[in-house]
Amino acid sequence: MNSIVTFPNRIPVKEFEERRFKVYTDRQLDKIEAIQNLPEDTLFEMKVVASVLPFRVNEYVINELINWDQVPNDPIYQLVFPQKAMLKEEHYERVAQLHREGADKKEIQTIAKEVRDELNPHPAGQMEMNMPELDGEVLDGVQHKYRETVLFFPSQGQTCHSYCTFCFRWAQFVGDKDLKMASTDAGKLHGYLAEHPEVTDLLVTGGDPMIMKTKNLVQYLEPLLDPEYDHIQTIRIGTKALTFWPYRFVTDKDADELIELFAKLVDAGKHVAIMAHYNHWQEITTDIAEEAIRRIRATGAEIRAQGPLIKHVNDDTDAWARLWKKEVQLGIIPYYMFVERDTGAKNYFEVPLAEAFNIYREAIKKVSGLARTARGPSMSAGPGKVEIQGITEVQGEKVFVLRFLQGRNPDWVQRPFFAKYSETATWLHELEPAFGEEKFFFEDEYEAMKKGNG
């Protein structure tokens, strides 16, 4: 077992045995004992869907987080195991027929790629509009959509301990280089940040950066302690590891070094925010998950929780209220309830915006003010993060009240606007302006931005 990092005036850590990380992909479906008693049709459907959408799950998730007595309705099972309806019927049948005929892997992958290309693999213009340049060269693995925040995709962090079936970055994990965003060039990242003093926040994302060895994370983050990066006030790290592999922060061989890195950044004056991706309260029911949270918070880093509202997993008021209450109890800040993005298996997971708002509102009513920091439902759309503030009636017309929480133009932020009420709309582009307006106020400027004129 590795050594233990302690901090002054902190309760000593509870001891946990180091655990071996064992993962299964689509090639090892037949090796997962827990699913072998499922119907043969179900196993075949898993195989078909997993040849199109990425599949990866580890033993901790299988043995500790899924209630197998509740399968197929268990939320964590839905979160990690493929379901037939995640593909449209015509897509499913195209791929299933090849499996029935015993087609070779290359032929299956050819058709699978055609299906993926129809699933909007990179939503919100992330491959067209968010790519910054340094010295006239486009920076791979870097995105700069909002003025204050730069996203960085380190190549060593472009996988996860397990994959979420609904993941909007699923295209990172299917082995197609044309769909991947990643960089190994720390120097170019630092060069870009040095030239952009308006940037205050660096978000290290993926995949999952916590899949990386700590030594790799160090090369990206420690240089930011130099005076030329004083404008970088906040370092955010997006991760699902607190759910899928909390041992990363407790007993992994370089867990102590990781905790020390967080403490070093905090002690140097950086605000370190772990952007934890939580979807259901079942994810925070193990002792090791609570210990990982405690260790991170002991460094002075904070944990903010975010995740989308997704059908079959958490489209339930009580589930959200219970999750937020548990997060507050553990010292986590509820941050965002997102709307499922218009990509991948959206048809299986999407919830109409009207229903999403009602779930959010009813859940918020059940928690104290400390949990009401959760904003949403929020759509991370092309123009920016658009929040549904309410459903009301104005001048006899039922409408959605919307606002930008973040926008490509900062002047859009907090400016209310209205859309016609819809029972079926699930994304911004499906909404129509209210009160007879032809366009939303931001549309012309956004179109100009897409053409490179804004």
Image (cartoon, rainbow, N blue to C red):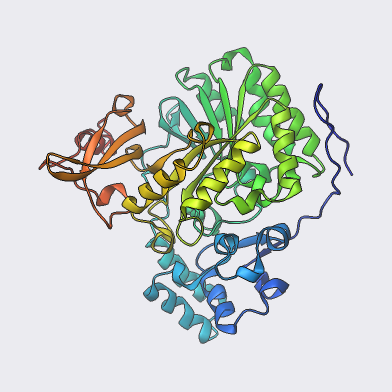
State the residue in front, 118 or 162.
162
**Quadrant occupied by the C terminus:** top left
Q: On screen, 409 above or below 47? A: above
For residue 105, side relative to residue 241 (left or right): left
Residue visible at 56% across and 73% down in the picture: 46
**Quadrant occupied by the N terminus:** top right
State the residue in front, 392 or 148.
392
For residue 73, side relative to residue 350 (left or right): right
For residue 318, side relative to residue 11 (left or right): left
Residue 100 appears at what percent x and percent y?
52, 85
> Would residue 123 be seen by someone viewing this image from the given angle?
no
Residue 195 appears at what percent x and percent y?
48, 19
Q: Which residue is outermost to the left? A: 436
Q: Which residue is outermost to the top? A: 227
Residue visible at 82% across and 30% down in the picture: 11
State the residue in front, 327 or 130.
327
